[in-house]
Amino acid sequence: MKLLHLALALISGSLLAAGATAQPLGAGHASLDANPAACPAACATSNGPAVAALAPKPGPAFGKKHAKDACGKVWVPGRWEYHRERVFVPARTERVWCPPEYAYEYQCGKLVKVLVHAGHWKVVVVEPARYEMKRCKHWVPGHWK
């Protein structure tokens, strides 16, 4: 088994030096499925379909977006996708001190200062709650198509 891995490493090194690039392997590749008949003969070798899948295949030129394997599947690389999303923004509030209120009244013929409302904290809405459209991004991983 170690000899097989060594041979594959040597083959891939010589092919990479010759200008070929290795293709990414992922779930859904026909040569990795349980049914080797699903993959055309180009993927199969005398050592079995898994060895052919590990061997590097000539890749696209630098700058191309998609790479095809021998089975006709296309590798779509991962990317960031941007979209606009409706987001709830809660109200912004502040605590405000309301001082005590006094009034002057006559009691028994004398002018007296009387407490009408005690001092207290009051919550005031500075900005009301609202919905906003925000630009969001999320990562879409690469996959075989």
Image (cartoon, grey):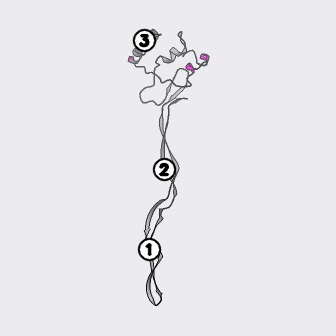
Mark 2 sits on what residue?
134
Mark 3 sits on what residue?
6
Query: Which secondary structure, mark 2?
Result: strand
Question: In the image, which is nearer the foreground, mark 3 or mark 1?
Answer: 1
Query: Which secondary structure, mark 3?
Result: helix
Q: Amino acid at mark 2?
A: Lys
Q: Amino acid at mark 1?
A: Pro
Q: Main secondary structure of the magenta part?
A: loop
- The disc at residue 100 is 1
Q: Determine whether 107 is above or below 118 in the image.
A: below
The verdict on residue 91 being magenta is no
Question: In the image, which is nearer the foreground, mark 1 or mark 2?
Answer: 1
Which quarter of the image is occupied by the C terminus?
A: top right
Q: Amino acid at mark 3?
A: Leu
Instruction: Tell me which numbered mark, 3 or 2, is placed earlier along the sequence.
Output: 3
- The disc at residue 89 is none
Q: CA distance from mark 3 to mark 2?
A: 52 Å
Residue name at image x 41 percent, y 12 percent: 10
The foreground one among 94 and 16 is 94
Q: Determine whether 115 is above or below 137 in the image.
A: below
Residue 53 position, x and y percent, is: 51, 18
Local crowd size for mark 1, using a 10 Å CA cut-off: few (<14), some (14–19), many (≥20): few
Residue name at image x 53 percent, y 20 percent: 70
Q: Determine whether 121 is above or below 131 in the image.
A: below
Q: Are marks 3 and 2 in contact (CB under 8 Å)?
A: no
Q: Which residues are magenta?
A: 17-37
Instruction: Tell me which numbered mark, 1 or 2, is placed earlier along the sequence.
Output: 1
Local crowd size for mark 3, using a 10 Å CA cut-off: few (<14), some (14–19), many (≥20): few
Q: CA distance from mark 1 to mark 2?
A: 44 Å
